[in-house]
Image (cartoon, rainbow, N blue to C red):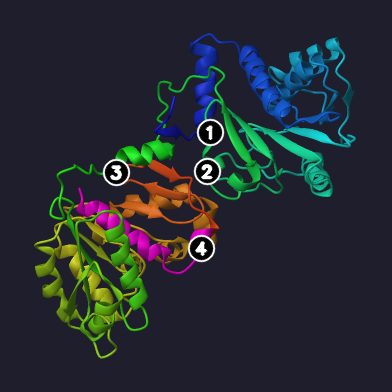
Amino acid sequence: MTRAAWPLVSAAQMRALDRHTIDELGVPGDVLMESAGRAVVQAVLALLSPGDSVLVVCGSGNNGGDGLVVARHLHALGVPVRASLLSERLSGDAGPQLARARAVGVPLEGKRWRPPAAGVIVDALFGTGLARELSGDARANVRRINTVRRARPGAIRVVAIDLPSGLSADTGQVLGAAVAADATVTIGLPKLGLAFEPGRGLAGRITVARIGIADAAPGVTLDASLWTRAGAAAALPARPADGHKGTFGHALLVAGSEGKTGAAALCAEGAARVGCGLVTLACPAGLNDILEAKVTEAMTAPLPDTGARCFAAAAEDGIVALAATRDAVGLGPGIGRARETTGLVRALAKRLDLPLALDADGVVAFAGELALLRGRRAPTVLTPHPGEASAVLGVRPAQINADRARAARELAEQSGAVVVLKGAGTAVAAPDGALIVNPTGGPALATGGTGDVLLGIVTGLLAQG
């Protein structure tokens, strides 16, 4: 089945679904653990070469129990396997799994394990239950797994159960130290922390093991999802065969200042490339000749500027008049942060009664005053990067990236807008808290101008309805 989106769950949501499955639906936890372990066995077998062996490094909780299931099934298949125990005092359903592993003869060793010469290390130390920084033996084991993997590149592969040990399931941040895996088999549903860096990178190739845990439970609202290509494609506006340029909307882009005509040109091209029927680029009058030469598909509209060739307050009425015959407005790329221009942005947001996309300096114009946008009658979209988001919220960029889902939701709640928080794992948040994570993109987009193109794309899509 092709999914439009994968639900992304927090640690608390996953625990609630797990408990509902066991307590209300009557599926024993021991059965779920057995199913999880068998799913991980398939991932391990896919990475083994002749002569390889497997080491399963087990914690004391359910993640360790999953690991003991893996070791028992591999042993039954004749795969050379050993299991290392961080502690022999196991909790929950993990205890019976240790007894079963012993009964069938799985070789067991303590926390000072010997790595395989070649093969797979299964990280079964911690799962979604980890909520503290690793320390002591746990941290030492995580670091040792990473050291062995680095020392024997290609010879040692690491498979993590549920998520790499040491990662926050909710944010993807490292809790003191975290395993770097080649593959992760996440159990039930993917965790929110696997959608954001550094968690996404540390997890390697992620697969989802559907072991029978319920996807829904009373009192559990799954409000985050990871879009797939199919989901994104289904959301694109229709392109009827008899359509013409008047069918596909008219976007007005307000962009540019001295030294930043490229931003204006790129956002205009983005709107055209996404299929918008008509594009008008409003720019400071002193830059019109430059942009007439730079843009081919878009029309230009010169407006009053300051002596420094950025938008003047006097441009307000002209922009409002242009917007009256357009379907959406994009505002911000390269406009600068002069006081007069910032005042213009705020005035336009109040007066315009059609969909509005704000980027860059257009977003920063509302620093500390996002509530000014809540009174808009038409849809609003903000597309900040972490630096712009931090300026608006009054925090450091590192704080934005430390919990990208929370930051996007906070921006959306304060502004009443849909927020597209750009970065590694772009987070799209709605004012009601719903969240979509875009898994595509990468460092190829880490160059000046890509955000300007995105603003054009968003405005072009808004104009198409």
Picture layout, residue 366 above or below residue 138:
below
Which of the labelled discs sits on residue 195, or is there none? 2
Q: Which residues are magenta?
A: 444-465
Residue occupying image coordinates x 36% and y 75%: 262
Label 3 vs label 4: CA separation?
Answer: 25 Å
Q: Main secondary structure of the magenta part?
A: helix
Q: CB of mark 3 within 8 Å of CB of mark 2?
A: no
| Lower sequence index among marks 3 and 1 | 1
| Lower sequence index among marks 1 and 4 | 1
Q: Which residue is mark 3?
A: 236
Q: Position of residue 174 (x, y in %)?
A: 65, 48
- Is residue 62 at all visible to an observer of this figure? no
Q: Quadrant of residue 87?
A: top right
Q: Nearer the viewer, residue 256 or 293?
A: 293
Q: Which residue is mark 1?
A: 190
Residue occupying image coordinates x 29% and y 80%: 339
| Lower sequence index among marks 4 and 2 | 2
Q: Quadrant of residue 358?
A: bottom left
Numbered disc 3: secondary structure: loop
Q: Is residue 6 left or right of residue 128?
A: left
Give the label, 3 or 2, closer to the camera: 3
What's the amino acid at mark 1?
A: Pro
What's the amino acid at mark 2?
A: Ala
What's the amino acid at mark 3?
A: Leu
Q: Which residue is mark 4?
A: 446
Residue occupying image coordinates x 68% and y 21%: 37
Q: Position of residue 21 (x, y in %)?
A: 51, 16
Label 1 vs label 4: CA separation?
Answer: 26 Å
Give the label, 3 or 1, closer to the camera: 3
Which of the labelled discs sits on residue 150, or is there none? none
